[in-house]
Image (cartoon, rainbow, N blue to C red):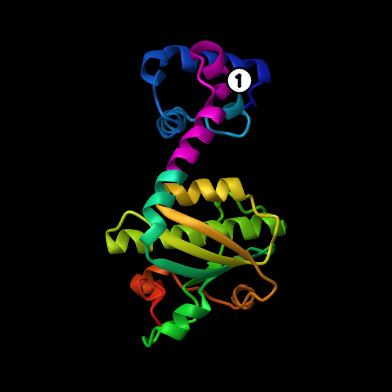
Amino acid sequence: MATATASEEWDKAAAAVRAAAEELRGSDTAALRTWASSKKLLSRSMWPKVKRELYKQLDIDYDTQRETENATRRQAVAAAATTAPLVELYAAGDERGAFAVLPGPAVHAGNDADIAEAAWYGTFHEKDTIYRDGDQDSADNSAAGKAVFLAGKVRESQGIDAVRLLLHISNPNLDGDRLAGTAAKAGVALELDITETNPAYEYCERPGYQAWQAIRLSDLLVDEEQ
């Protein structure tokens, strides 16, 4: 099948926004992305054109709106997290395609349960949206995102509005804004600690995997009274 030209993609983006104008006015960014996904408009080539058409036709500045929504969400999560439980994790990725998320040292020190050393490790899914083969920064960014996801699952398991996540990671080149936005969406107040000592890297070298579903999520909560 022939690849669409840039001109054809612009025409497609313009037509799609025009046809859905009434539906899209007043939508938040999640709804805009859901709509774009349903129309198969989220490709790296099409999505920037769609965002531009949203601005041209409907005066919707998607990126600014997303930043505003994320800031509001982070403030709400931070307020809810002042007395929220703490989750502490290590995360690491490997440019060759592996990742690991481990409980932090406070979990081991304060919990007598028989906790597996690794909470979640294995290889990146072939459709991972962040990891790029051979790229270390993307590997660590994806691993950090998995730690945030796991903290969000802890929050859900406890039926509470927010948790705090102390995330130890060794790569200073994380996309902090993206990660904070992802965390806020999951009800996670994120604190990053850049450390040279990161036992998660060892698990990136191990064969096999462990799914996060195999662990007891409550075991990842830190007992701060210990």
Relative depth, front residue between 46 and 2:
46
> x and y percent of residue 161 in the render?
32, 54
Residue 87 at x, y percent in the picture:
44, 68
Residue depicted at 39% across the width and 87% down the height: 114
| Residue type of the residue flagged with mark 1 | Glu
- The residue pinned by badge 1 equals 9
Number of callouts in the render?
1
Q: Which residues are magenta?
A: 49-73
Which quarter of the figure is the N terminus placed in?
A: top right
55 or 110, which lies in front? 110
Residue 166 drawn above or below residue 60: below
Say whether residue 68 is magenta. Answer: yes
| Residue 102 in sight from this viewpoint | yes
Query: Magenta region's main secondary structure?
Result: helix
- Is residue 12 in sight in this rendering? no
224 left or right of 64 in image:
left
Location of residue 99 by image quarter = bottom right
Q: Where's residue 113, x and y in %?
A: 36, 86
Q: Quadrant of residue 91?
A: bottom right
* 86 part of magenta stretch: no
110 displayed left or right of 102: left
| Quarter containing the C terminus | bottom left
Please name the residue shown 42% across and 14% down the image.
21
Up/down of 101 relative to 18, above or below: below
